[in-house]
Image (cartoon, helix red, strand yellow):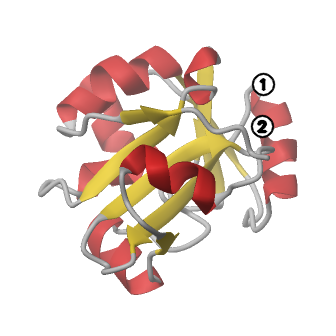
Amino acid sequence: MRVYDELDRLGIAYQRTDHEEALTMEDCVRIGEALGCKICKNLFLANRQQTDFYLLLMPGDKPFKTKELSPQLHTARLSFGTPQQMEEMLDTLPGSASVLGLMNDPENRVQLVIDREVIRDEYIGCHPCKNTSSLRIRTTDILEVFLPAVHHEPVYVELKGV
């Protein structure tokens, strides 16, 4: 409910659909078709030392290659952050990671990283920090209203997925 309250407070319109727990990107493709947008892949990552944390937004159908992303973030090696770290920093669990979880990170411990391909679409599809609902939100509302309100500035990367 906090996500919906925050979106309403910011005047951000969204379309919502409730569904069974989305466990795979195939589930998200079907949900995206129902919403008329693509659901982003959201990956919670950490550097080798577990001192720097990242939330990567990328197209759901694009393969993720750490060797492609690490140099763009100037870090030697990336791996997935732990479920405990994700819950502590974004107040969500694996399978429910979302750009909207950044509202739960007032200390800016998580750096948002966005594949430029994501921002080419008019809408972003994401979970409201629970993978039993999905939202369609204008990309400009995420970039120009939501992120400034939660004090997170994205780093943009180019991922080829090959």
Which residue is at the front of the view, 152 or 22?
Answer: 152
Q: Position of residue 97 (x, y in %)?
A: 51, 60
Circle 1 residues within 10 Å: few <14, some 14–19, many ≥20: some
SS state under label 1:
loop
**Which picture quadrant has residue 91?**
bottom left
Q: Which mark is residue 55?
A: none
What amino acid type is highlighted by mark number 2? Gly
The residue drawn where x is 73% and y is 33% is: 38
**Which picture quadrant has residue 20?**
bottom right
Q: Measured along the vertical axis of the image, is residue 118 above or below residue 23?
A: above
Q: Position of residue 124 (x, y in %)?
A: 59, 30
60 left or right, relative to 58: right
Circle 2 residues within 10 Å: few <14, some 14–19, many ≥20: many
What amino acid type is highlighted by mark number 1? Gly
Q: Measured along the vertical axis of the image, is residue 10 above or below residue 66?
A: above
24 left or right, relative to 106: right
1 left or right, relative to 122: left
The residue drawn where x is 52% and y is 19% is: 138
Does residue 1 show up? no
> Disc 2 designates what residue?
32
> Disc 1 designates what residue?
36
Q: Position of residue 157 (x, y in %)?
A: 50, 35
Q: Position of residue 110 (x, y in %)?
A: 29, 57
Q: CA distance from mark 2 to mark 1?
A: 6 Å
Q: Measured along the vertical axis of the image, is residue 150 above or below residue 9?
A: below
